[in-house]
Image (spheres, grey):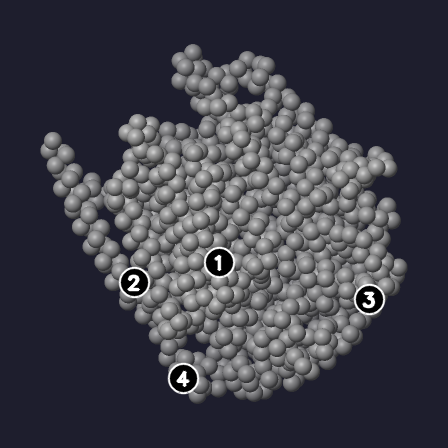
Amino acid sequence: MKMLKKLMCSAIVSATAASTAAYADISDNEVRIGYLADMSGTYSALAGPGGLEAAKMAIEDFGGTVNGKKITIVSADDQNKPDIGANKVRQWIDVNNVDMVAGMVSSAVTIAVNKVVESKDKISLVSGSASSSITNQYCTPNSVHYVYDTYALAHGTGEAVVKEGGDSWFFLTADYAFGHSMEADVTEVVKESGGKIVGGVRHPLSTNDFSSFILQAQASGAKIVGLANAGADTTNSLKTAKEFGVVQAGQKIAGLLIFLNDVHSLGLETTQGLQLTTGYYWDRTPETRAWSKRYFDRTGKMPTMVQAGIYSSVDHYLKAIQTVKTDAASAVMAEMKKAPINDFFAQNGQIRDDGRMIHDMYLAEVKKPSESTGEWDLYKILRTIPADKAFRPLSESKCKLVAGR
Amino acid sequence: MTTQALKSATKGKTMNKTKLSFLVLLLIGLVAPYAIYPVFLMKLLCFSLFACAFNLMLGYGGLLSFGHAAFLATGGYITGHTIMQWGLTPELGVLFGTLCAAAMGFLFGKLAIRRQGIYFAMITLALSQLVFFLYVQAPFTGGENGLQGIPRGKLFGLFSLEDNLPMYYFVLAVFVIGFAIIYRTIHSPFGQILKAIRENEPRAVSLGYDVTKFKLVAFVISAGLAGLAGSTKSLVFQLASLTDAHWHMSGEVILMTLLGGVGTIFGPIVGAATVVTLQNYLSQGPLSSWVPVILGLIFVICVLLFRSGIVGEIQKFMKKNFN
Amino acid sequence: MAELLGFPPQVLFGQLLIGLINGSFYALLSLGLAIIFGLLNIINFAHGAQYMLGAFVAWLGLKFLGVNYWAALVLAPVVVAAIGIVIEKTMLRRLYKEDHLYGLLLTFGLALIIEGSFTHFFGVSGQPYSVPAALSGGNNLGFMFLPTYRAWIIVASLIICFGTWYMIERTKLGAYLRAGTENPQLLQAFGINVPLLITLTYGYGVALAAFAGVLAAPIYSVSPVMGSNLLIVVFAVVVIGGMGSIAGAIVTGLLMGLIEGLTKVFYPEASTTVIFLVMIIVLLIRPAGLFGKEA
């Protein structure tokens, strides 16, 4: 009964709020942010509760208000299920009047949420997802893909590896949309750079034992074993590869989607020498160190690129509201696309019309245990991949917003 | 003799009571969207129908299916596919999804129905795992991304369902139809024979009933209605995904039915409402990561203390104190 | 050299060996399930969670108490069996008179509770547990590189499986157990403490799961969800072998490991599904399973 009452109240409140929204600068006198991510599942370490903390940091650093209006945040666990995520966001917008959704990890959830956000004309800032299709065939005018995507990872890591002589590849691919698109993106890069693909296996998601696939990779004679999978599948592949002496036998491993937390939990012994592409590393500049130190003090962990990106994206959103003095989606989005992003996370970052935020990416190598000076001293940055090279050029885009340019 | 008479008298009374409570529920259903968020209500109705369909098999057929997720998912995928690719109107899409789920139920039933108890549960589980694999692999399901952005479309090509209110009344109508089918099935001679089989199969056989056929028909109806729930759900959320096909979903529907009361008419509705509400409200509070633990606790408490479920216990209580 | 089905024979050899190693886990787990099912008539849905508990006890022991691998191999099963015995004494016991399905539902709920709480406290990303020094490294067998630890898994699980089989089929205790499976009332009448026998049996079945968990800890990530997906595969193994059949569980476990191994070469996408297909086929041809007796 109590719940019913509460619901009734919120329904009435939202109904009256919706009718006045058009006249107010900030709808219902509050900027409401929804944080959606996998909070307890496979991907919870790369965004999850840490990402929520980063978003809260961004709001606190902004002073808790924008143009005198309070900023509030709600969060939910999407459990990596598109129906749960989309339903939650629909409810946030319909009932709680949420203005912007941040976080979002699983690509399936993101695509579902973006459809809802577009139909309700709100904003979504995607930091966790990998699939480049989010700003390609699934692009919407209401979404920004902020940190990285499969195109950037494939080109960053793929090109670097082929350049160093890794010209024959064998793929361990997770058998779902993300794995397939990752494999396709890398295959293109490898072939363009003069390498060849000698084989691959597609394993079911959350495979228990990788030894059989590692054995096939060894038998293939490829120079590079490419891991087109994520999360637990990647860490298990790496563990098994170490156990079966893949690297000692002369093959190299290219992890295509590896986060700082993966390397940290696997340890340098297992991951040393691994090359990867990242959008952020805490120990790169004085600014990154300063921000990451503050984050570390709150969470006890160094941030992944996703967690850093969440802070940056929320901050950019709030700045845009400050400038245009409204939280109406179209005006805020226009300002976000106009203003360059210059903070600890990105230098001269820019959101394109298809929603892709382009910024410098970095090719990193995991340190040897002997080179590391601390628990979180994990990467050395080999080189910077400039923003205009890192992401899919608009000329190749299938996005409906930019097609024909 | 007197007890016999008393029993038939109370039976008449409960029939009236059931009808009365049904009317009350319907009334609540009609006004509810003005007080409660309609999408939440629609989700509740879909899962209620799913649980009722499942209950037909467990509560009245005595067979525990551990594969009902397959039907839910089939309904959703087929409806989504036919609406998106063939341009069907929503009611035709839903009908088509329901029929496909029923057809799959026929296949499942053909393979599993001769077995009982745990074997039946395990075979249905295995079959639903095969269906899950099929949906991961088949291109038309969109794999991990699922079918996204299924248009709600126009009912009979005339009435737009894009807004939540008309959609809600469509879902309510579907639910009432599905529920009526179940109610009629249970209270028909067919339902009586089904109960007889559950209570004592050898006797039913000796009375000359083709037990297998009865069970199979019940299974097909149950599968079809589970498919109906899935089809409607895919319209509501404009999405059909692998979540619905996973075996956890088969476990969830067992929980709903068990919690509400196996073999009671309203039990599955109460159970589904409780579980969906819990999931909905716990998932954004500080307790969000405890949801599986809480569901598990409910499971354990139900099995140990309230085997007849919420509605079953209430009925017992009423019988004890008011008769 | 000639090729078999398009693959060089040494590749197939390697895959079969790997299949056998995975099959050892299936054998250990399905053996525990089969014993429990035989005497208690309960499908122990918490088996996967108990396997996970075994691995976690080993990991926690190493991290906080310095208990090494070899000690954990003995201690973890004992600890987890004790938990299992408490569960049996306080909960399962009340259900023996009810439909067997209630046992399945209760243990399903328990699995949710155990896995959910571990997920809350430890997260799902795996915890590292290193291979003990004595078993690190490996040998090149010519057709493949075999890590010593994997070889140890086969040896250890075969010893335990065979020992259990021997105990049940060839000793007096085993005779009681088999008698209890056939007719508990009669056995009780002979003066055997059947409730105690049931409790111990459940404890032993659970201990086998925990033992498998410790074996798995160094090669798979120690994670709260490590058991849940394995579990339904193991169910299928038990059903294929014939519910309650001890030898059936062991042999089928190994056999399914091999079949899965071959699937990983020819059609890897289906490697987690193939066992269910086998199960359906077997049940259509032999309704009581490969080694089961027709009721």
Check disc 2: other Cα within 10 Å, few if <14, some if 14-19, many if 20+.
some
Q: Badge 1 local density, few (<14 within 10 Å), some, or many (20+)?
A: many
Q: Which chain carries label 3?
A: A
Residue A38, horizontal then vertical, whole percent: 57, 59
Depth check, mark 2 against mark 1: the one in front is: 1
Who's the residue at 13% across and 38% down the image?
A: B6
Q: What element carries label 1?
A: helix
Q: Does the rendering let one see residue C44?
A: yes
- Residue A357 location, quadrant: bottom right
Q: Is mark 3 on a helix, strand or loop?
A: helix
Q: Could you say which disc has been placed on residue B141 in the image?
A: none
Quarter that holds the C terminus of chain B: top left
Does residue B204 appear left or right of residue C6 in this picture? left
| Marks 1 & 3 on one chain | no
Q: Do labels 4 and 2 share a chain?
A: no
Q: Which tag is nearer the camera, tag 1 or tag 3?
A: 1
| Residue type indicated by callout 2 | Gly
Task: Locate residue B34: give its quadrant.
Answer: bottom left
What is the crowding at mark 4: few (fewer than 14 residues within 10 Å), some, or many (at least 20)? few
At 44% across and 57% down in the image, what residue appears?
B97
Question: Where is residue C48 drawn, in percent x and y?
Answer: 56, 39
Q: Which amino acid does label 4 sit on?
A: Thr
Return the disc, 2 or 1, that comes first in the chain's sequence. Answer: 2
